[in-house]
């Protein structure tokens, strides 16, 4: 079985590549700069390839290099922190290129081979933020919410060919994902953004390691059946139930007070 894992140089992607290699998969792992991955951080058995999800040429080159794959793990992406009001248009577009459009292009490039073989599995790593956005990460949440919507629709489109689509939504995982900051020097949001950032940093320090997400992904792709939506993390399943069943007004008040009090 051949698997392609994007963003395999660190965090969830690296842990997932390792988990799949240990289960006998032939793994291609992508990075923006494969040559820059230190020897001690490389996973033995992973073939590292360059990928820039904002570049059509880079995506096409990767698709040519890997050929047909059985499993696609769409994991690579970026995050942000800052008020929507001050987000530069070019940075918003790049965020969506990384977290949505580039993922879709990989899916489009690999689906024909999966349909021909009448099998395949696409695992899109979204975020619980796409279900329940928090203040000052709204654009990141929007890109992940869009990926969730695409995945849910796609799942029904490709099911007749035996292709599965699974959403994995990490919740408070210590991934080390880059978080670009949008904030003007005289921004009226400075105090609130600082409080939100401090709250996030405290959560990340106490958060589980990426391995728990990687092991769930490996279990999903090795199983003949899986749930279409899988929240992963400490209390993730409980949070999913609360968000689903509690009044939206209550959830909004809780998230606002929790993330803005510092």
Image (spheres, rainbow, N blue to C red):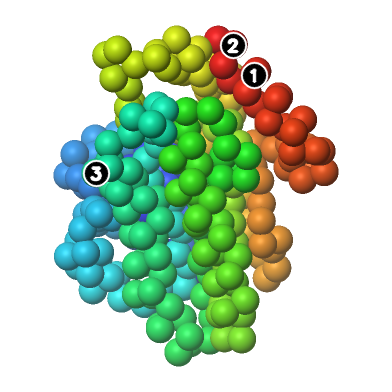
- The residue drawn where x is 57% and y is 16% is 260
In the foreground, 16 or 179: 179
Label 2 residue SS: loop
Label 1 residue SS: helix
Q: Is residue 221 visible?
A: no
Q: CA distance from mark 2 to mark 1?
A: 6 Å
Q: Which residue is mark 1?
A: 258
Which labelled disc corresponds to residue 90? 3
Q: CA distance from mark 2 to mark 3?
A: 30 Å
Above-or-below relation of 95 to 198: below
Q: Which residue is mark 2?
A: 261
Going from the N terminus, do you reach mark 3 or mark 1 first?
3
Location of residue 85 (image quadrant): top left
Q: Position of residue 156 (x, y in %)?
A: 62, 76
Q: Position of residue 162 (x, y in %)?
A: 60, 82
Relative side of 102 to 65, left or right: right
Location of residue 10 (image quadrant): top left
- The residue drawn where x is 40% and y is 83% is 113
Foreground tag (3 vs 1): 3
Relative side of 108 to 151, left or right: left
**For the residue carrying disc 1, how many other residues have a C-alpha within 10 Å: few (<14), some (14-19), or many (20+)?**
some
Q: Position of residue 249 (x, y in %)?
A: 74, 33
């Amino acid at each position: 079985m051949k698997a392609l894992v994007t963003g395999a140089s660190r965090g969830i992607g690296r842990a997932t590549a390792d988990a799949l290699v240990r289960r006998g998969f032939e793994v291609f792992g992508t990075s923006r700069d494969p040559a820059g991955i230190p020897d001690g951080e490389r996973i033995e058995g992973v073939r590292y390839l360059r990928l820039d999800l904002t570049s059509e040429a880079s995506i096409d080159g990767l698709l040519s290099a890997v050929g047909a794959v059985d499993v696609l793990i769409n994991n690579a992406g970026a995050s942000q922190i800052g008020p929507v009001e001050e987000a530069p248009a070019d940075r918003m577009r790049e965020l969506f290129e990384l977290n949505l459009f580039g993922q879709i292009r990989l899916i489009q490039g690999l689906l024909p081979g999966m349909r021909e073989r009448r099998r395949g599995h696409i695992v899109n790593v979204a975020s619980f933020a796409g279900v329940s956005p928090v203040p000052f990460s709204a654009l990141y949440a929007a890109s992940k919410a869009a990926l969730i919507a695409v995945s849910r629709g796609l799942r029904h489109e490709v099911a007749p060919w035996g292709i599965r689509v699974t959403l994995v939504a990490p919740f408070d995982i210590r991934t080390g994902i880059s978080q670009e900051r949008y904030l003007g020097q005289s921004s009226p949001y400075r105090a609130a953004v600082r409080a939100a950032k401090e709250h996030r940093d405290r959560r990340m320090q106490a958060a589980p390691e990426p391995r728990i997400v990687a092991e769930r992904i490996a279990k999903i792709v090795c199983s003949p059946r899986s749930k279409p939506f899988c929240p992963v993390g400490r209390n993730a399943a409980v949070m999913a139930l609360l968000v689903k069943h509690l009044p939206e007004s209550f959830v909004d008040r809780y998230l606002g007070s929790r993330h803005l009090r510092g």
